[in-house]
Amino acid sequence: MSRDRPARRRFGETPTVMLTSMTDMFTLILMFLLHFVDPSMSPDGQVALPSSPAVDAPAVAITLTITPEQVLVGGIAVFSLADGAHIPAAVERDGKRLVQLSAALERARAAPGSPTPAASATPDDDAPLLRVECDKSVPYTVVADALYTAGQAGFGRFQLVVVSSAGGAPAEPQ
Amino acid sequence: MRRKRLTETAELDIVPVMSLIVHLIPMLLLCVRFSMLAQVPTKGQILPTRPAESLGAYEGQQEKVVSVRVSSQGFVVGGLGDAEAIPCTATPCTPATYDYASLNAAMVAAKQLHPTESRVVIAPEHEIPYEVVIQVMSATRERLGDRRHAPLFPDARLASDDAPGSAPPDVP
């Protein structure tokens, strides 16, 4: 009987914990998360993106974000929306063009290190690309004004970011 | 100081590393979004929409230009000869009650009339939610429910009633 009983630990002896297997596991989880998390590709939490069966992955580009509260370029607020996600009358306009937004987009394009589109086959695809993350509840008039302004600021292509409702593997970024 | 014996192994203190990893993992888990993002491409130009100058020009638009006008009553599709109205499945129209399946069927019919055309003009009214615009773009891009993703009109151009420009009227 006494032989089966585990030996008592001596007084003052510290127990050792084997951390090697746990370290291996944590390292694998860390590698997995670092591989899949790309902060530049995560939309702002304030934006409820619409869903679509599209599968083309969005590319890294200058981002125009339209939430029900405000319009942002590269994460920096340009102006606030009011009265049910509408552009307030106080926002300066030049016809349909929104002056503040146009200036912010031009600044973002001119900034050193701003994302540039990858070289592509057709000259049309070389036009500056704007990534648009817009809340699904925003009325079209706000989107149209913002996109018109972006077009006037030199952006020739837009990629409207959506949550893919299609199954299967994502396509490579354009 | 006494020398270590040859048989004695040095223990590596990995507790700080573990502490760092334990902090990093919750932070990364907070950042990660388990949804797949995609993109719907469109050209960087908002086309103007204007009424046709004459009945003949209007009929010409109806035949030549594949277009979808989105209103608070439903869709009006151009490019099929006569404009085809597709009302919502229930009133009042909400993003869920627009009849995207019928719109997709109309686009399949339009593609048979215009097999070489890839452009479609989408002209939503001002108060239409962005969600509806995206759904319309999806319904015009490819055959819905087709796993082969057969393309219909992938080159979507957005239009607005008050967009300035000298482009010809595209939408009836």
Image: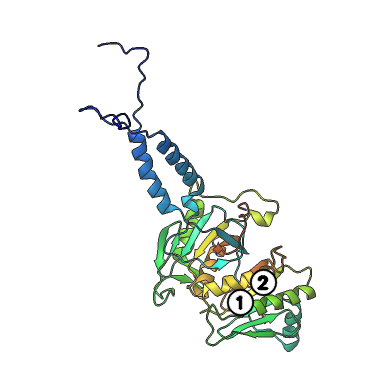
Q: Quadrant of residue B168?
A: bottom right
Are the residues flagged by discs 1 and 2 from a single subunit? yes
Q: Where residue B8 sits in the image (x, y, percent)?
A: 35, 17
Q: Where residue B93 sits in the image (x, y, percent)?
A: 54, 84
Q: Disc 2 residue type? A: Thr
Please give left or right for residue A44 compared with residue B55 in the image.
left
Q: Is B132 or A18 nearer to us in this picture?
A: A18
Please give left or right for residue A142 compared with residue A90 in the image.
right
Q: Which residue is mark 2?
A: B140
> Outermost residue toward the front?
A1
Q: CA distance from mark 1 to mark 2?
A: 13 Å
Q: Disc 1 residue type? A: Ala
Please give left or right for residue B146 compared with residue B2 in the image.
right
Vertical position of residue B61 compared to residue A3: above or below: below
**Which label sits on residue A77?**
none
Q: Where residue A91 sits in the image (x, y, percent)?
A: 41, 71
Give the structural element (helix, strand or loop) at label 2: helix
Q: Mark 2, chain letter?
A: B
**Quadrant (top left/top right/bottom left/bottom right) for the N terminus of chain B:** top left
Please name the residue shown 41% across and 58% down the image: A76
Q: Which residue is mark 1?
A: B123
Residue B169 visible, this angle? no
Q: Mark 1, chain letter?
A: B
